[in-house]
Amino acid sequence: MVTRVPETVRPALPEDHGPLAEVLARAFFDDPVTSWFYPDAAKRMRHARRFFEIRLRQLAVHGLIYTTPERSGAALWAPPGQWRESLRQSLMQLPMLPVLLPRIVRMTQAVREIERHHPVRPHYYLSVIGTDPEQQGGGVGSALLAPVLLRCDETQTAAYLESSKESNLSFYARHGFAVTECIELPEGPPLWLMWREPPGRRRGHPEGSRSGP
């Protein structure tokens, strides 16, 4: 369980967005969902970098993006009640439309399926976390999680994420997350839904968590 925030972690600044988008694109290059969204490997880095640039701008308003002095990774969070994209945030995705258009139907279905399973109980939402492939396994990911998980513990607030890699489940479990469900995206890869109760609360699937039937 996280007990303190490492001194090597700091809030991200606007000038970090470009370098962090590059790092996240490298980190997610072989990710099953990223590969499903951008199947052309020759263009995937460029498309993923653009996507993460937009995602960084979308979430920057919450002040919950963390990185390291070396910009070796990033964690992007949304606070309780703010996980769903606003109209303004959705409009930021318009430059990606030509890239996504050939698969827009199944992608829209996928987003709806993910949103349908999103918990309604108050929680901090870990939208993205990624570490430069050359730095993975060195504790950067744990350090990036620390600021918000500490806030969760101090305020007795839950946390939630979706993991697209089964190999990452043990990492999240070490930080108190537990799998509540595994869903299959339409014609796509599986996603593991993970929930973290703060200390002192019973772990498990959050009651009344789904926003749909």
Image: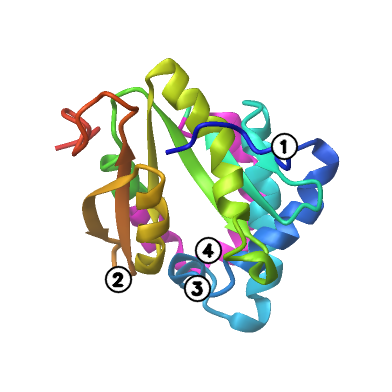
Nearest to viewer (mark 2 / mark 3): 3
In the picture, residue 139 is in which quadrant? Answer: bottom right
Nearest to viewer (mark 4 / mark 3): 3
Marks 4,3: beta carbons within 8 A:
no
- Quick one: 2 or 68, which is closer to the camera? 2
Which residue is identified by label 2?
Answer: 187
Q: Quadrant of the C terminus?
A: top left
Q: CA distance from mark 4 to mark 3?
A: 16 Å
Marks 2,3: beta carbons within 8 A:
no
Q: Is residue 129 left or right of residue 10?
A: left
Marks 1,2: beta carbons within 8 A:
no
Which residue is identified by label 1?
Answer: 7
Which mark, by number, is residue 35? 3
Nearest to viewer (mark 1 / mark 3): 1
Residue 97 part of the magenta-drawn span: yes
Q: Earlier in the sequence, mark 1 or mark 3?
A: 1
